Amino acid sequence: MNLSFSEEDLKFQDEVRSFIAENYPADIKNKMDNGIPVSKEDIQTWQRILSKKGWFAVNWPEEYGGTGWSITQKHIFQNELADANTPTLVPFGVSMCGPVVYTFGTQEQKDRFLPGIINNDVWWCQGYSEPGSGSDLASLKTKAVKDGDHYIVNGTKTWTTMAQHADWIFCLVRTETTDIKQQGISFLLIDMKTPGVEVKPIITIDGSHEVNMVYLDNVKVPVENLIGEEGAGWNIAKFLLAHERTGIGGIPALKREIRRLREITSELPLGEGFLKDDELFMDKLNKLEIDLLAAEYSELRTLAAMSKGGHPGPESSILKIKGTDLQQGLSDLFVEALGYYAHPFMSEDDLISNEGRIGPDFAANVMPHYLNYRKVSIYGGSNEIQRNVIAKAVLGI
Amino acid sequence: MDFSLSEEQLLLKDSITTFVDKDYLFDVRQKNIKTELGYSSDFWKTFADLGWLGMPFSEADGGYNGGPIDLMVIMESLGRGLVVEPYIPNVVLAGGLVSRLGSEEQKQDLLPKIISGEIQMSVAFSEPQSRFDLNDVITSAKKDGENYILDGYKAVVMNGPSSNNIIVVARTAGNQLDKEGLSLFIVDPSLKGVSLRNYSNVDGSKASEITLENVSVPDSSLLGSEGDAFSALEEVIDLATLAISAEAVGIMEKMNEITLEYSKTREQFGETLSSFQALQHRMVDTFMAYEQTKSLLLMCAAKLTDKSDDAKKAVSALKYQVGIAAKHVGEESVQLHGGMGVTDETNIGHYFKRLTTIRAIFGNTDYHLKRYSAL
């Protein structure tokens, strides 16, 4: 057992750190550090910088443009990105659609879709959930009926993050109605510019526009956009679920945010002193920090097992539950730290106006973040579904 | 990064697991804890023969040079078997202090006998008012010619009843809460003025209340230099905290297994308990509590091995987590067993009792959260 980084790992850490310091654009950093929402162009700029360096499709096999890094190196890389408060990489192309295409796609499909993902020219969104299919994903009803060399797709997708920015959507569609609902599902790629595709925003309780409804009305999709066999979509969906989960706990970002909160406790006035003098508050902060430490080492244990050839199976469900618990817990502590100053609502225009903010500078995002983060225990398979997964896969019941 | 055990450590784990599964049967244990000794001297001999008692000591002292990770492996496996034999008070605490502070003579006198299982020792560090603060010591030791005179009271001294020698923490200088001025004395309990009131704890282990009244001990019984014991005591208690946390992790792992197995066989309303989702989710939560604790255990063992700057902080993080998880896993395991969980005949309740005493030993969650915050 040896949990320290090797010489090479530390050298790698330095290399990543200096690359970020030299290449992270100041204007994007300024927005991130001041809680001003970043635009699609900002994210694209940053992702292209990483891509140019060959550090974007980190997990892909080298033959498709991946890094060939060890698990430890990937861990260091994620930590450094989070540490520098860089924009979260958008997962739909690089972490989801890409791996599906290079694992299940034909050579033509790989040649057609992978370059656009790795170069950030094509943006993807995920068409999974439907109004009637939340946690019970396999009950989805969107229909794709074969008509010559096309499928005709009808249905509605919901909770589609970033659909307003996306060029393409990867969808689970029903190509056959069967007794077993997991059968007859297929994995289809759809160009968002196809006639019949309509995107309508869903505004969430924090006032932001992240998610959308996507209506598919007689959308004509060429059969060559089917990934894998017809009816094999559920297997692909399961593959993706396991694949996307490493890192879903968001541990590196949590480490940065808890450090930030600790700094804030020395800045926020309380009586004649500062918030850090409030023992009850600091107890909660310290408890959360210990919990985070445990989650961090749980993730490292999983990564170490993977580096020896294991698969991120049900452990990823544990990381999802623990990570999202911590994300919500920390977002709540930020709200508590502010007292009344968590309440004023700042629009995007307020944030960039010269008038100055109400309360402490960082306050504007705190309540929206808390509200927005109610989602994390609901999305990606609700935490109750994750418990079902663990009960079945780990406990064998 | 590598979390895996070495070949030697895997062999050690195997040998203890085999002993626990084959020989350390629940009904045998239950008989042993009811005897006056409170454990099996035959088993203790086995521990010595298999080299477990010598693990934490250096080769020069006659041991096997084991580190914190080896200690973790031993205690996790002993925990799974709910082993009551006093490994921590004797080997880790007393042995740890003698090996760190002892003169050549003291080491040669005591360590071979600890390693061979010939003697039992304990450390009397707590007092009624001190709870978990190692520096809070009223018991005094005053120089008197070639001797020291000890006066005071020591509370809940683990393994006190069987001890041939008791290491007593006493104040040779300073005020009640000072870290300076603490000294250690190796005291023969048969000396005039030493009285022990022996009893069983709820977990089956034995302990003593010790009164020291005008006890005269020779200079040669001083362990380490006068007034300077605190840092070694803290270091040894930290190592013992890792050890007892490992024991707790072993216990929780076992309790989760027992409970899961029970849920698969016990039927109510024509279905096994394991088919009820409300219970499934609770078992998932106790499994996660165990996993989280195990992660911190590994982290802490590694940091103690590396002598990291933040090793003390890691110990407190671990023991805090152990306290939280022990309450959660312990109480849920009993609840999921229904009425059987509160009977004396079922093993789960005895695991629960040990897990419950572990919550306080070497500091409860409040104590370690405060220590974590202060470090």
Image (tube, coloured by chain):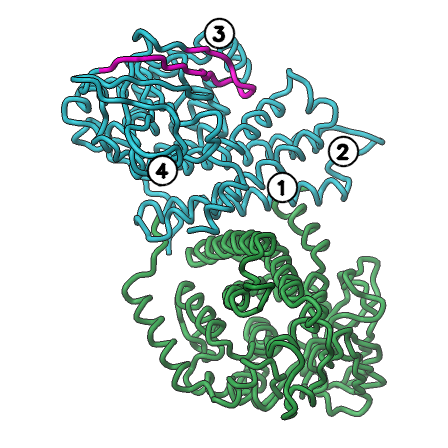
Chain colours: A green, B cyan
The chain letter for the residue carrying disc 4 is B
Circles 4 and 3, Cβ within 8 Å, touching? The answer is no
Residue visible at 22% across and 24% down? B222
Across and down, in percent, residue B272 comes to: 76, 33
Closer to the eye: label 4 or 3:
4
Residue visible at 40% across and 16% down? B160
Who comes first in sequence, dot 1 or dot 3?
3
Closer to the eye: label 2 or 4:
4
Residue beneath label 3, please?
A: B35
For this view, does B78 lie left or right of residue B58?
right
Where is A354 relative to A129, above or below? below
Residue B286, labelled with which disc? 1
Residue beneath label 2, please?
A: B272
Who comes first in sequence, dot 2 or dot 4?
4
Quarter of the figure with residue A40: bottom right
Whether residue A230 is visible here, answered yes or no, is no
Residue beneath label 4, please?
A: B178
Residue visible at 69% across and 68% down? A370
Measured in 3D between alpha carbons, the distance from the residue under mark 1 to the one under mark 3, in whole angstroms, is: 34 Å
Residues shaded magenta: B196-217
Where is A371 relative to B118, above or below? below
Whether residue B186 is in magenta: the answer is: no
Closer to the eye: label 3 or 2:
3
Who comes first in sequence, dot 3 or dot 2?
3
